[in-house]
Amino acid sequence: MVNLFSTFDPSTNIMNLSLNWMSTLMCMFMIPMSFWFIPSRYSFIWNNIILTLHKEFKTLLGPFNHKGSTVLFISLFSFILFNNFMGLFPYIYTSSSHLSMTLSLALPLWLSFMLFGWINNTQHMFAHLVPQGTPPVLMPFMVCIETISNVIRPGTLAVRLAANMIAGHLLLTLLGNTGPMLSSSIVSLLIFTQILLLMLEFAVSVIQSYVFAILSTLYSSEVI
């Protein structure tokens, strides 16, 4: 079990230096300088993705959004996507599979939204605790339920991302460990299954970064 979870251990030391967290910023060093200066198909595709996300986030934030607020969520999407994608390479620590990483993204965002909402739109925030059309008898219970659902938001954001990243990697590791005990004909089937799972993991890494950014946008639109 120790070997199984070693890829998710942030305290792996190389020459007494904890270098696992370096994978968080490794993607920035892997992008060549020519990507930013010389137009190419890759930069064209990425610009189209950013433009699409900008339009979608702008729609979700509504007409009262502050200018440039979509940049925050696009940057968040890009950062999580790069980290999830880097975790698919062998022997690279997946930082987004650790709660200390995902909580450090979700908690400051949620706290800033809450502070902004309660300071600037106090009446709206109180009104949001009781959904429209709630019977007077159920109002105290609805306030409790809405408060709890609001408080657990950063936790659900962090756990969702970390759990999805861990699940796929563990499945790949478990299947890979059974390889030496199988015959050559079944190993070929195992490799094919691993490739399919890797493709699924690639899709999950994109989807989870999109879900994290979209939910953060929706939470911020509620306090504007």
Image (cartoon, grey):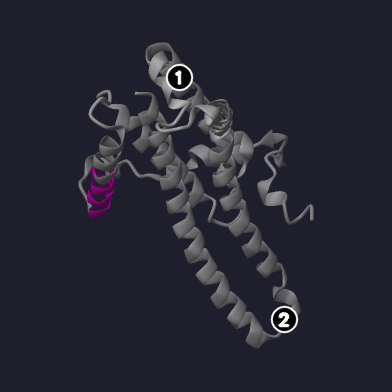
Query: Which residue bears the numbered disc 1?
Result: 126
Q: Is residue 46 magenta?
A: yes
Which quarter of the figure is the N terminus placed in? bottom right
Q: Nearer the viewer, residue 18 or 9?
A: 9
Vertical comparison of 38 with 203: above or below: above
- Figure check: 121 above or below 98: above
Label total for image: 2
**Amino acid under disc 1:** Phe
- Residue 54 in sight from this viewpoint: yes
Q: Does the magenta-highlighted stretch encompass residue 135?
A: no
Position of residue 107 relative to residue 37, above or below, is above
Question: Image point 69% across, 65% down: which residue?
Answer: 174
Label 2 sits on what residue type? Leu
Q: What secondary structure predominates along the stretch shown in magenta? A: helix
Neighbor class of circle 2 (other Cα within 10 Å; few <14, some 14-19, many 20+) is few
Q: In which quarter of the view is residue 100 placed? A: top right
Other residues around mark 1 within 10 Å, as few (<14) / some (14–19) / many (≥20): few
Single out the residue that lies furthest toward the bottom: 185
Q: Quadrant of residue 193?
A: bottom right
The image quadrant where one finds the C terminus is top left
Residue at (45% x, 19% y) in the render: 126
Residue range of the region highlighted in magenta in the rendering:
41-51
Where does residue 110 sit, x and y in percent of width and height? 49, 27
Q: Secondary structure at mark 1?
A: helix
Q: Are marks 1 and 2 in contact (CB under 8 Å)?
A: no
Q: How far apart in space, not on screen, are marks 1 and 2 (Cα)?
A: 61 Å
Residue 55 drawn at (x, y percent) = 24, 41
Q: Quadrant of residue 119?
A: top left
Q: State which mark lies toward you, 1 or 2.
A: 1
Residue shown at the point (49%, 45%) measured from the top left: 83
Q: Which residue is mark 2?
A: 182
